[in-house]
Image (cartoon, rainbow, N blue to C red):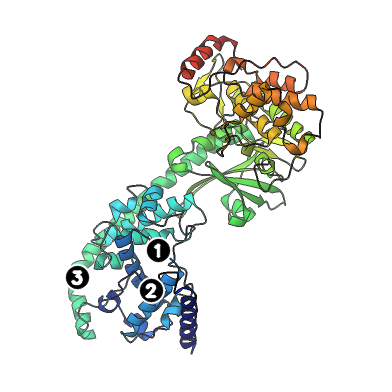
Amino acid sequence: MKLNMAKLIFFFLFLLLSFFTTFSIDTSCPMDLSYVQTYPWDKSLCLQDPNGTNCCQALLSLMGMGLAQHLRDTSNFDLANLNVSFSCLTKFQDKLSALSIDPAVVPFCFKNYTQFVTNTSSCAGIQTKKDWIEKAGQVTPLDTACKNMTGLTQCTACLDAGYTVTSQLVGLAPNSTKCFYFAILYAAGILNDPKDPNAAACILGLSLAASNPSMSRESIIKLAFALSGAVTGVLLAFVIIIVYRKWDKKRKRNALHDEFVSSFKASVLPNCGAKWFHVSELERATNGFSQRNMIGQGASGIVYKGTLSDGTSVAVKQILDLDSKGDEEFINEVEIISKIRHRNLLSLRGCCVTSDNLKGKRRFLVYDFMSNGSLSDHLSNNLTRNNLTWPQRKKIILDVAKGLAYLHYGLQPAIYHRDIKATNILLDSELKARVSDFGLAKQNLEGQSHLTTRVAGTHGYLAPEYALYGQLTEKSDVYSFGIVILEIMSGRKVLDTSNSSFLLITDWAWTLAKSGKVPEIFEESIREEGPKGVMERFVLVGILCAHVMVAFRPTIAEALKMLEGDIDIPRLPERPLPLSHESFRSSLWQSTSRNSSRMSIV
């Protein structure tokens, strides 16, 4: 009765959908499903127990064979739309009916009729083979482990490769739900013939029927006993080798993890006073790192809101891309933060290092939760903003300047942040600004005029001499700070990719300032709020800090005094050559070398 009702519902929905789309959408099924009747799959699973889990699993694998062939033929992982999916499932029903299998088992097993329909959120935006290559790479572990399936050892290696690639893709888009299924289709359809028995059994998990169904049960048992003596030894040897290799790999990985944890606890934690959290504490605090608790994501990590057992609200940052960066940024951030204690810098509450077979190695940093999010959330280029008043903007700018001044002058050796931008400036419940994210920060060595290092940071905020030559000084942070001032005062994006004639915010602000139109730089909502002279002073300091030439930029200490009105702002220097000009590089280099002695060194 249950199956008959499901059949009626499925049939009614298909007819209803077909009625509305017959004249606009091609609903024909692109898959040749004749193999359902001819392929030697174990039909007894559905003949004996159509309601059972084994039957549904067999049908999913059987449908997967068709989808793998569809991928091989068309380069598409899924079907075009819901109508095509209905058409294929109806065709699938007909083939099962010809095998005396109740067709109502199809709607019973495939209750979600959209599960085979293409969807950009299924797996990191992948829909075609081309998308797969762009996201997973030209050559993946699947390509080396799953070609031309042969036996048990390769099957195990192929399965491990599937988990590895799935983990990589889910790392790109944590909301993905079908990455492992896509890996199966790729391995079966692109790397193998989907109808190859070894590929069908290992990759698709399809149960195959006995090779000679006319043989009696007694004959099969006798044959099995006859062969068992010959193959048991071989299989046992394979199993022992596989188990030993996995055990040895796990042992070595655990030894490396234990060594890292011991070294970390001995050398880093005692210096920073941070708490050592167990991963179970953080899982409870963040409800298992649920999507609901996710409050931000960037290139370096994902941030979750959490509540500790004592009721304290915290932000938990999980470091990403550990395979390529190792623990470099994690250790760097912990060591840097351990040296700072300032009201305008986000301090570290604790950290966590963990590693397991299921989820691999994970690194977490725990901070105080900033209830007002980042500065970026409040700027006018964010559609969900809470508009800031002039006094609030003024206070935020001064807070950031004081935090940077502490990094440059309050510590020995000085610290260069390297990634000052709106998203790395957090606001507490009173809108007090705190500079965060020290993963890219560098310490200056005493006596050096600059550091030469790989370029890192965010496009639009990078100082030209740093972006071109990798020369890092305290004035690299000053340049980024100037960009932030202009963002706050104007509400304009750092890079304007619209039809505006100005790409960079600095070009736009410079042109207005040199034309005597500084008030036009102010965001419209604050133009009548504050004293024009003070507001103009803040804009001019921003333009001066973001000057192309290093020598014309003030130090952060000088910029702070200008903002507070303690010293006068010098007349804006003449406009330098645009960045696109061919002579810019040589003139910038000469200016940098000529004025290196004038740079403030900490």
Q: Which residue is mark 2?
A: 88
- CA gap, disc 1 and disc 2: 12 Å
Q: Quadrant of residue 286?
A: bottom right
Q: Which amino acid, by three-letter code, is at mark 3?
A: Gly
Q: Is residue 140 visible?
A: yes
Up/down of 439 relative to 474, above or below:
below
Q: Which residue is mark 1?
A: 78
Relative horizontal placement of residue 172, taking residue 407 as reference (left or right):
left
The answer to which of marks 1 and 2 sits earlier in the sequence is: 1
The answer to whether the residues at label 3 and label 2 have Cβ atoms under 8 Å apart is: no
- CA gap, disc 3 and disc 2: 45 Å
> Which of 299/516 is in front?
516
The answer to which of marks 3 and 2 sits earlier in the sequence is: 2
Question: How far across and how far down the image is residue 313, in percent?
Answer: 70, 49
Question: How far across and how far down the image is residue 196, in percent?
Answer: 24, 66
Q: Quadrant of residue 438?
A: top right
Up/down of 301 relative to 280, above or below:
above
Image quarter of the C terminus: top right
Label 3: few (<14), some (14–19) or many (≥20) C-alpha neighbours in 10 Å: few
